[in-house]
Amino acid sequence: MSVDVSALVRTRVHHPEAIAEAAARRVRRPLIGDSGRLMIVAADHPARGALSVGDRKLAMANRADLLERLCLALGRPGVDGVLATADILDDLLLLGALDGKVVMGSMNRGGLAGASFELDDRFTGHRPEDIERLRFDAGKLLLRVDYDDPGSLDTLESTAHAVDAMAERRLPVFVEPFISRRDPVTGKVRNDLSADAVTRSIAIAAGLGGTSAYTWLKVPVTENPDDMVRVMETSTLPAVLLGGDVGEDQEGAYEKWRGALQLPTVQGLVVGRSLLYPADDDVTAAVDTAVGLL
């Protein structure tokens, strides 16, 4: 579909209440549908200032283009829903693209990509009360733990409070954990995808809060995909695989996902840039291939 930016702006200027009205009348569905699996398209990257895809530094900066790609992906068979920040979900509500879809609000986007405070990942997005008020279906948060950064304790505490607040509302929360480190030379934050690190991150995330009843995990595939069997034995919490920026090796990413999707706790995929901005720019083919893995 073609997105009329002028129409969206007119609505935002003259009828801002239309967003809440669209959320109130949105047709909802269960988190897990008839397929028994979950396929979510992620688009919460821009709010962290992460606009690049591969060598395209501002690929996600054109909002109309992003919305068109999202609408195309959401219209494909087997796509269950979307993960995004408030600005994007508000646009999708106004476009009528979220009926019958799972809607996941992104909760903490304070750790801006490349910033000196990147690991101080405060909750600047959806609050649990926002997700409840707007009748959304779940929330997602990022948990990066750096053993050399005392501030990680604050991140752990605020994450635990968010897990509790979502559980009080009986709303699922998807926790995306990493063991992270700053490169001593460049200062860039890097996530450790070794089997040991991913195992520890899962163990830490699974134990947060007063109950794990509504906690899901959003996990990466390890550097060696064969390690996923023992890594995913760390917890009985349901999990989905994240995509990340796979660059040119789209087929390699599919193969990694295919193997991990056979594991008992892995329930689906939450993938963004690699499906919305594939190397060949064929969103339909990329999404359909990912759905086929399920």
Image (cartoon, grey):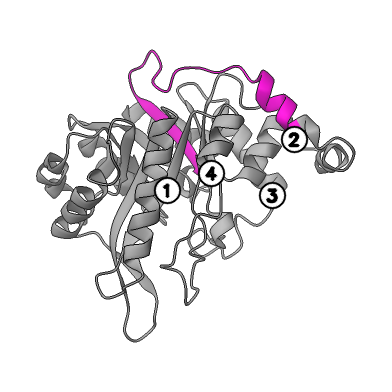
Does residue 167 lie above or below 188 as drawn? Answer: above
Give the label, 2 or 4, closer to the camera.
4
Give the label, 1 or 4, closer to the camera.
4
Does residue 173 lie above or below 159 as drawn? Answer: above
What range is drawn magenta here? 19-42
Q: Amino acid at mark 2?
A: Ser
- The residue positioned 29% from the left and 57% from the top of the image is 178
Q: Residues within 10 Å of mark 1 (few under 14, many from 20)?
A: many
What residue occupies the far left of the structure in this picture?
Answer: 230
Q: Which mark is residue 127?
A: 4
| Residue designated by label 1 | 141
Kindly check if marks 3 and 2 are in contact, taking CB atoms under 8 A apart as contact: no
Q: Amino acid at mark 4?
A: Arg
Per the image, label 2 sits on a secondary structure element best described as loop
| Residue designated by label 3 | 63
Per the image, label 4 sits on a secondary structure element best described as loop
Please tell me which residue lies in front, 279 or 261: 261
- Going from the N terminus, do you reach mark 2 or mark 4 first? 2
Is residue 229 left or right of 214 when viewed as pictured?
left
Q: Quick one: quadrant of the N terminus?
A: top right
Kindly check if marks 1 and 2 are in contact, taking CB atoms under 8 A apart as contact: no
Q: Quick one: quadrant of the C terminus?
A: top left
- The residue positioned 39% from the left and 83% from the top of the image is 186
Q: Residue 64: x percent and y percent?
A: 72, 45
Mark 2 and mark 4: span between their CA atoms?
31 Å
Residue 271 in view: yes
Q: Residue 14: x percent and y percent?
A: 90, 38
- Going from the N terminus, do you reach mark 3 or mark 2 first? 2
| Residue designated by label 2 | 2
Q: Amino acid at mark 3?
A: Arg
